[in-house]
């Protein structure tokens, strides 16, 4: 499940548990730290669905990245970037 909020600067999408590390949405190839990769594999119920959801998020980022900011609160750097006040 994810939650999308329309802000004054476009949409912000919390991607929930679809991924845990920001580089998993890289366009050229998904990357994940070994520890998080192990944890996600351990916790996943449907590997194909998890990867399909990540593919959909990559396509959303590629096609609408200027309109929507995708983040995962599991990724400390992504969460911190969104929590910083803008000027």
Image: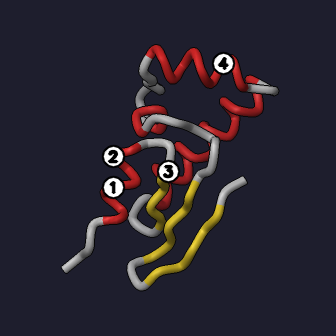
The percent position of residue 80, horizontal first and vertical second, equals 33, 55
Q: How far apart are marks 1 and 2 (CA)?
A: 5 Å
Classify residue 56 as left or right of residue 10.
right
The percent position of residue 31, horizontal first and vertical second, equals 43, 24
**Label 1 sits on residue:** 80
SS for callout 3: loop
Q: Distance between the residues labelled 4 and 3?
A: 19 Å
**Label 4 sits on residue:** 41
- Determine whether label 2 and label 4 are within 8 Å by CB: no
Q: Distance between the residues labelled 2 and 3?
A: 9 Å
Front residue of 1 and 52: 1
SS for callout 2: helix
Q: How crowded is mark 1: few (under 14 residues within 10 Å), some or many (20 or more)?
A: few
Extreme-right residue of the structure: 45
Q: Distance between the residues labelled 3 and 1?
A: 9 Å
| Residue at the image position 69 percent from the left and 17 percent from the top | 42
The percent position of residue 11, horizontal first and vertical second, equals 50, 72
Q: How far apart are marks 4 and 1 (CA)?
A: 25 Å
**Label 3 sits on residue:** 73
- Determine whether label 1 and label 2 are within 8 Å by CB: yes
SS for callout 1: helix
**Label 2 sits on residue:** 77
The percent position of residue 69, horizontal first and vertical second, equals 44, 61
Against 50, is 78 above or below? below
- Determine whether label 4 and label 1 are within 8 Å by CB: no
Q: On the image, which quarter does residue 17 sit in?
A: top right
Front residue of 13 and 85: 85
């Amino acid at each position: 499940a994810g939650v999308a909020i329309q802000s004054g600067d476009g949409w912000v999408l919390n991607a929930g548990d679809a991924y845990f590390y920001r580089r998993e949405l890289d366009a050229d190839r998904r990357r994940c730290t070994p520890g998080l990769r192990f944890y996600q594999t351990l916790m996943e119920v449907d590997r194909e669905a998890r990867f399909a959801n990540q593919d959909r998020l990559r396509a959303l980022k590629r096609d609408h990245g200027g309109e929507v900011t995708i983040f995962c609160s599991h990724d400390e750097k992504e969460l911190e970037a969104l929590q910083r006040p803008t000027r």
